[in-house]
Image (cartoon, rainbow, N blue to C red):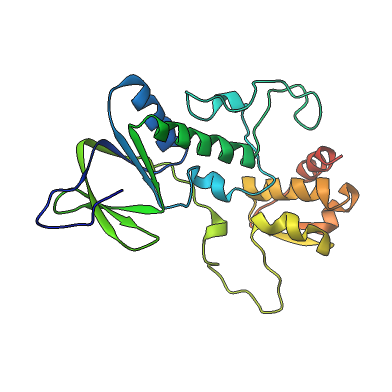
Amino acid sequence: MLSVVDEEHEPAVNTDYLVVGAGASGLAFADVLVAEADVEVTVVDRKEAPGGHWLHACPFVRLHTPSAYCGVNSLQLGEDRVDQAGENAGFYERATGSEIREHFAKAAERLTQTGRVRVLTRHEHLGRGSKGEEIRDLSTGELSEVSVRRKVVDARYLESSIPATHAIPFYVDAAARLIPVNDLPAVAESASSYAVLGSGKTAADACIWLLANALSPTRFAGSVHVTRGFMSAATSSRWSRSAR
């Protein structure tokens, strides 16, 4: 689809906009752009599929706002319904990670079908080259250049940092069992106590999931220890109630 860099020839691919990042921001921008203007758009992303950080989201995490508020304009996420049961009963539905990934995959497919959008996954934007914007195919290492007629749009400025994709930045004793939070559902029943590193949103989600699925609420204080943070008795009580 892209031409190999050649100093003697102009790039074979020309586009009005080059959007860097196929997550929520990049796809939403491209979606509105092609709906409102007669333009050609090329979207590139380092990941293997559209969806941004949702590709690596913890299995038990879902949106914290109604599904209808999220996604791209041209494709509704969810059914805009009020949940009748569960922890979200009485409130508008909140999509799961798998539902969000499916939404963005479908959105990217629909954009491609317009004939005015290219979505190139496993491609990295390297910056300005001799003839255009330089792109590397991460699968083959091949370098290409794209001629951008209007603007390069970097949609990564709100990019989330996903710990599960990082190298561990501290020493771990060989006798210790350490897992990323993404793997928790697969191993939750194999232990009776846990130490959660961190005390932010992800740590809170992990503790709530453990209480609801793997641990008895009455064993909370002695079974889950949160490091690098302070958990009050009131907070512990609320989390215990949420798991019932």
Q: Is residue 30 left or right of residue 47?
A: left
Nearer to the camera, 176 or 134: 134
Q: Quadrant of residue 197?
A: bottom right
The answer to whether residue 20 is above or below residue 41 is below
Q: In this image, 224 relative to 31: left or right?
A: right
Q: Nearer the viewer, residue 184 or 144?
A: 144
From the top left corner, tell me how far across and down residue 14 is, in percent. 22, 40
**142 left or right of 179 in image:** left
In percent of the image, x 31 and y 57: which residue is there?
A: 136
Res. 200 in view = no
Residue shown at the point (83%, 58%) measured from the top left? 223
Residue 231: % across, % down: 73, 49
Q: Nearer the viewer, residue 210 or 236?
A: 210
User: At which x and y percent is residue 150?
Assistant: 20, 34
Closest to the observer: 110 or 77? Answer: 110
**Quarter of the figure that contains the C terminus:** top right
